[in-house]
Image (cartoon, coloured by chain):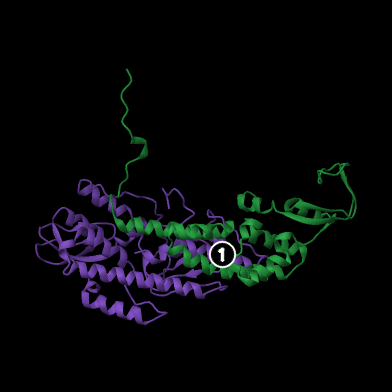
Chain colours: A green, B purple
Amino acid sequence: MANYYNIDDILAEEGFVPVVFHKAANGVVIDPSSETNSVEQGAKVELPLWLAQELYLRQAISISVPACFSQRTRLEIQADAACVDLKSRSPYFYEFGCKIAPLVGDKTIEILLLSAFKIRYKEILTKAYTAVFTTTSKFLTLLTKEETNLYEAAQASMAAFKKWRMGGPRLQRASVLGRKRKPLD
Amino acid sequence: MAGQSDPHISLFSAEEVEFMAEDELIEIVPNLRMDPLNFICGDFGPFLPQIATQVPFWLAVALKKRGKCAIRPPQWMSVENLTQVLERERESQGAFQVLPFHYVEISRLLFDHARDDIPDMYMVRSLIEDIRDVRIHKVETSLEKFSGTSAVKIPNLSAMEVNIIRPFVGRALQAFYKHDNPEKIPDVDRASSAQTRAANNEPRMIMAEEFYNYIQVSKRFFFFFWFAAATEEITNHFQPASDEGTSVLLETLFGESYLVPFSL
């Protein structure tokens, strides 16, 4: 249950998926524009993943492929995975896909994710270690949370190494001792 | 490690790697007479003027700072040897040359503290920097090639280089593993004990083939107390060495690194 409290996991499940209801549901306000507080059988709505998962277990709905894995995205990824703005679709693209795959029963998602990640990973690698801040800012907006994690890890370790190489005093003055204050009378 | 503000980035900071590098033995030429020093890590034997003795690096630096010795640079640090190593590094695309595990840290410490003891210091320094650049570049190119595998083996990598790429490669491997096998998403709990790690069938990364590491802190305490306190680092965050065999692996297990040291 380590993922239960993991913030990234919780946020990844926030993404919406289109579902089709098999049973009618009363007393729920899923579609704010509808007049009645209920959903009929066969209605198509967008639910967050955490809700959809539970309803799926109760066999009340059937889930279809969400919008971020649509054909258009796949074509874009196949064209050039490194430049696709995955963050706009979902900042948790990969986790989302991993969770969706068993529910939707779509095997191609995993392959798609893997190939996309491989290509983007190469890009991250080359940019992470030899970073000049101005050029990479545009690239950073394309990355999902997971990839940003990778990138920042590499950056941080490289920066720490460079700082160590510079030398300097081994002891740092604590920030609490910053300013001398005049004693109050 | 303890005292780090963000332990999820890397298990060891650069300073900690340097701390561990200071355990290497190095030769000094003392200019004083002193009785043998008895530490937990060993006895370092009577110091007679102008007689070369082998001592740990931290002891050498401390003595040097007090002007009580001259440090002799290690064998591998000659200009000829380094030029040879540099040439071979540039020629061979995939392989890394054999260099001492802590060469980066040792060379930096020597430059800081024992500048006058190294002949041709600037030449040596620039050579080492070049070697380091070439090696890091090689590491990056070799990392580009690997994809989707679950184990990465890079022999002859040095401690500081390992430390630089450790968080990145750890997380990248984890991500690859997750996407290859979406059913078995591993548990990335850092506080998990060694038993859960062994039980999981997760890929491991063996970074360097031959190196050794001692985790001994308390002997430094004895030394500094005896010498009436230097102001160097006093850290006490290492756990005692376990009684494993003589093999030491540096394993990165999904961004979580641990050293399994061998006891003396």
Nearer to me, B223 or A177: A177
Question: Residue at 39% of width from left, 66% of height from top?
Answer: B161
Give the side of residue B2 with respect to residue A74, left or right: left
Question: Is residue B192 positioned above or below B151 on the image?
Answer: above
Displayed quadrant of residue B47: bottom left
Residue found 32% across the figure and 66% down from its top: B102
| Residue occupying image coordinates x 39% and y 69% | B136
Please, is residue B115 above or below residue A5 in the view? below
Q: Is residue A58 left or right of residue B50?
A: right
Residue B10 visible in the shown view: no
Amino acid identity at mark 1: Gln
Frontmost residue, B202 versus B8: B8
- Residue B259 is situated, as x and y percent measured from the top left of the image, at 43, 62
Camera-side residue of B162 and A12: A12
B222 relative to B73, above or below: above
Residue B174 appears in view: yes
- Local packing at callout 1 (Cα closer than 10 Å; few below 14, some 14-19, many 20+) is many
Q: Position of residue B217 (x, y in %)?
A: 33, 54
Residue at the spot of label 1:
B174
Residue A129 spot, x, y in % from top left: 44, 64
Q: Nearer the viewer, residue B243 or A160?
A: A160
Q: Residue at x 25, y 47 (%)?
A: B231
Quadrant including the C terminus of chain B: bottom left
